[in-house]
Image (cartoon, rainbow, N blue to C red):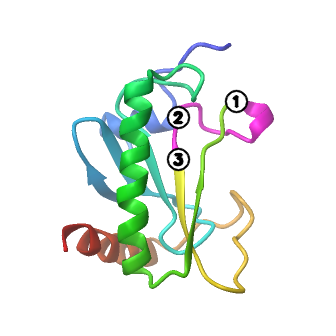
């Protein structure tokens, strides 16, 4: 297995070297909106621990990510009036992983509305700003 790259885009976001629409953070995880969302409110939950994927993360660190995804999912259901939720985690290229820092996708779902294809449409920054505000409000309610 390939080693963790400390210069991957999510590591840079964690270090504050790149901007993001942060919606949640604690001592173990960091959550921010995907700038190419597959649905409104599509959020990425990442560990602060360096881990390429599920195969090299410590079980306790992964448990924190799962709990973070659970918290984001509950808030996103309310914030976006969603009818369902898709949670995904990809590890290694054969699975479809593109950024090699473990992350879970939390995607609100709506009856009869398909997900946008992955990595095809960069969302308007004002729209993302509004989505972040709605999700933060739901998390703090």
Is 7 placed left or right of 94 in the picture? left
Counting residues from the start of the chain, the first of labels 1 and 2 encountered is 1
Residue 30 vs residue 86, the one in the foreground: 86
The answer to whether 35 is drawn above or below residue 65 in the figure is: below
Is 111 placed left or right of 10 in the picture? right
> What residue lies at 71% left-to-right and 58% top-to-bottom?
118
Residue 110 vs residue 25, the one in the foreground: 110
Task: Specify the label residue 32 is tagged with.
Answer: none
What range is drawn magenta here? 92-103
3D distance between C-alphas at marks 1 and 2: 10 Å
Q: Position of residue 105 (x, y in %)?
A: 55, 53
How busy is the neighbourhood of tag 3: few (under 14 within 10 Å), some, or many (20 plus)? many
Query: What is the quadrant of residue 131 in the picture?
Result: bottom left
Task: Specify the label residue 102 is tagged with.
Answer: 2
3D distance between C-alphas at marks 3 and 2: 7 Å
Q: Is residue 140 magenta?
A: no
Residue marked by disc 1: 92
Q: Position of residue 32 (x, y in %)?
A: 39, 55
Quarter of the figure that contains the C terminus = bottom left
3D distance between C-alphas at marks 1 and 3: 13 Å
> What residue lies at 36% left-to-right and 49% top-to-bottom?
68
Counting residues from the start of the chain, the first of labels 1 and 3 encountered is 1
In the rendered structure, are the residues bearing label 3 and label 2 in contact, judged by CB atoms less than 8 Å apart?
yes
Magenta segment's dominant SS is: loop
Residue sitting farthest toward the right: 94
Residue marked by disc 3: 104
> What residue lies at 57% left-to-right and 29% top-to-bottom?
54
In the rendered structure, are the residues bearing label 1 and label 2 in contact, judged by CB atoms less than 8 Å apart?
no
Q: Position of residue 65 (x, y in %)?
A: 41, 41
């Amino acid at each position: 297995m390939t080693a963790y790259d400390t210069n991957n885009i999510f590591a840079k976001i964690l270090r504050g070297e790149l901007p993001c629409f942060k919606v949640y953070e604690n001592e173990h995880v960091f959550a921010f909106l995907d700038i190419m969302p597959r649905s409104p409110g599509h959020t990425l939950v990442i560990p602060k621990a360096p881990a390429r994927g599920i195969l090299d993360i410590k079980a306790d660190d992964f448990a924190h990510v799962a709990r973070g995804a659970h918290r984001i999912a509950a808030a996103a259901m309310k914030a976006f009036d969603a009818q369902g939720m898709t949670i995904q985690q990809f590890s290694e290229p054969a699975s479809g992983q593109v950024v090699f820092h473990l992350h879970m996708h939390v995607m609100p779902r709506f009856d009869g509305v398909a997900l946008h294809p992955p990595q095809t449409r960069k969302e308007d920054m004002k729209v993302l700003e509004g989505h972040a505000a709605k999700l933060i409000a739901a998390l703090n309610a």
